[in-house]
């Protein structure tokens, strides 16, 4: 690792045994993604069809990827310095264009979405390259490799923005596949090979806190959607119960993620000799299903609030059961990465939700919502009780790799 004198002037200083705090500039940047997450959930609500779900999934993958890549960059660079702050402000502008384009990304604003996304990804990486000291040979080559991959995907983003209909979906799917594969192959490029994980040095506590903050964003969006819908409805007994069910479910998700898991992850990555490897797996990839589960659950809450009675159709079952299931799948994999063992409560919860979904059509949307909330509550309580008798010691670095 390069010493502080060899690091670029815009890099965060390395202070041994000290956690780098999340800056106010980063928190301001995150506000754009509160809006982006809201746009994604509202888009799914308005287009809850197989093709609509596929399109919305692609949009969510894009939103998460541009955010998490920015979090890596601000882990390396110091947002307290003016040039880095200006970078974040420009990325906020791009993020606003991206977010406002989401509802019509597969219609009239596809090119706007593509230009905003590609510009954020490529422009931010160019800034990183220019900010890296020549003495940081590994870090410079890492930035070059990332730039090659993102520039390649950018071609498909722009081409998709210029196309219409199914070709746009296909081209953007290719662009996302390129970007999601790139960290897994360590940004390998011809002649220069792949990056070393030592070139991905991150301050573990910071990256853990950033991703935990995004979970709060998603949960906050869920609460906002529920509250806004509830405020506009007539407060019948069914609507009130549906509102309470949605609120308790959000609390259960918070408890499952934050009670022990977030702390264990932060401790492990902070003490790891290869934090970049763990950050790639546990925070870059495995947090995505957690976020997706929260957003899908928010969609279910809205649907159940508006139509609590009758039989549950496919839309209700997929959102009400699929949301918590996605969340638990992400949570169990994340905790496996940081603890080294599978959380039994989460596994049982996933199976129970699968059984519930099988019989979901026989229940009303309200009863299905209550049942999923009860299951999530049981998982939260079960995990809390089990960890009292089993210390939550992060796994060894060997197993985490």
Image (cartoon, grey):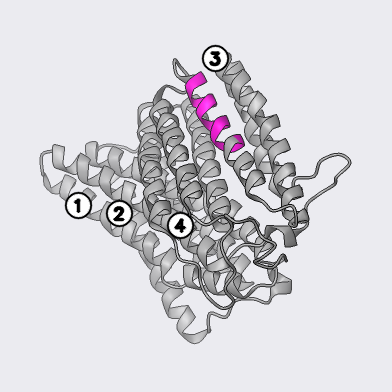
The image position of residue 110, as x and y in percent, is 49, 20
Marking on residue 165: 3
Marking on residue 241: 1
Mark 2 or 3: the one toward you: 3
The residue to which callout 2 is attached is 370
Dot 3 alpha-carbon crowd within 10 angstroms: few under 14, some 14 to 19, many 20 or more: few
Instruction: Measure how far apart labels 4 and 1 are at the Cα level.
Output: 46 Å
Q: Earlier in the sequence, mark 4 or mark 3?
A: 4
The answer to whether residue 299 of the structure is visible from this angle is yes
Mark 1 or 3: the one toward you: 3
Dot 1 alpha-carbon crowd within 10 angstroms: few under 14, some 14 to 19, many 20 or more: some
Marking on residue 80: 4
Q: Earlier in the sequence, mark 1 or mark 3?
A: 3
Mark 4 or 1: the one toward you: 4
Image quadrant in which the N terminus is located: bottom right
Residue at 45% x, 19% y is 109
Q: Which secondary structure, mark 1?
A: helix
Q: Which secondary structure, mark 2?
A: helix
Q: Which secondary structure, mark 3?
A: loop
The magenta segment is 111-122
Q: Is residue 269 above or below residue 9?
A: below
The image position of residue 138, as x and y in percent, is 77, 55
Could you tell whether 337 is left or right of 93 in the image?
A: right
Dot 4 alpha-carbon crowd within 10 angstroms: few under 14, some 14 to 19, many 20 or more: some
Residue at 42% x, 26% y is 101
Instruction: Measure how far apart labels 4 and 3 are at the Cα level.
Output: 43 Å
Image quadrant in which the C terminus is located: bottom right
């Amino acid at each position: 690792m390069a010493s502080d004198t060899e690091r670029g002037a815009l890099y965060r200083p390395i202070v041994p045994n000290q956690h780098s705090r999340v800056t106010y500039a980063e928190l301001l940047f995150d506000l754009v993604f509160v809006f982006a997450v809201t746009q994604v959930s509202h888009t799914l609500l308005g287009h809850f069809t197989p093709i609509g779900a596929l399109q919305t999934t692609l949009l969510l993958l894009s939103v998460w990827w541009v955010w998490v890549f920015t979090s890596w960059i601000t882990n390396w660079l110091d947002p307290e310095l003016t040039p880095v702050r200006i970078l974040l402000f420009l990325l906020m502008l791009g993020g606003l264009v991206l977010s406002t384009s989401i509802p019509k990304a597969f219609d009239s604003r596809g090119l706007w979405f593509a230009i905003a996304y590609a510009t954020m990804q490529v422009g931010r990486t160019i800034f990183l390259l220019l900010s890296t000291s020549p003495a940081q040979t590994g870090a410079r080559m890492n930035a070059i490799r990332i730039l090659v991959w993102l520039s390649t995907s950018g071609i498909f983003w722009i081409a998709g923005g210029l196309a219409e209909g199914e070709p746009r979906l296909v081209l953007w799917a290719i662009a996302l596949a390129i970007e999601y594969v790139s960290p897994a192959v360590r940004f390998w490029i011809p002649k220069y090979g792949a990056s070393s994980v030592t070139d991905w040095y991150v301050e573990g506590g910071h990256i853990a806190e950033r991703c935990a903050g995004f979970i709060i964003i998603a949960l906050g969006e869920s609460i906002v959607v529920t509250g806004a819908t509830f405020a506009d409805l007539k407060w019948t007994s069914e609507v009130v119960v549906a509102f309470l069910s949605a609120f308790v479910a959000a609390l259960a998700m918070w408890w499952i993620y934050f009670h022990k898991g977030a702390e264990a992850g932060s401790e492990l990555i902070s003490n790891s000799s290869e934090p970049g490897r763990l950050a790639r797996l546990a925070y870059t990839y495995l947090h995505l299903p957690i976020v997706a589960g929260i957003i899908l659950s928010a969609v279910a809450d809205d649907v159940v609030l508006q139509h609590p009675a009758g039989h549950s159709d496919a839309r209700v079952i997929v959102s009400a059961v699929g949301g918590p299931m996605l969340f638990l799948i992400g949570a169990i994999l994340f905790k496996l990465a940081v603890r080294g063992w599978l959380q039994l409560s989460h596994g049982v919860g996933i199976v129970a939700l699968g059984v519930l979904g099988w019989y979901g059509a026989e229940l009303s949307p309200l009863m299905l919502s209550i049942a999923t909330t009860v299951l999530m509550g049981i998982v939260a309580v079960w995990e809390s009780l089990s960890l009292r008798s089993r210390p939550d010691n992060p796994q060894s670095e060997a197993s985490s790799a």
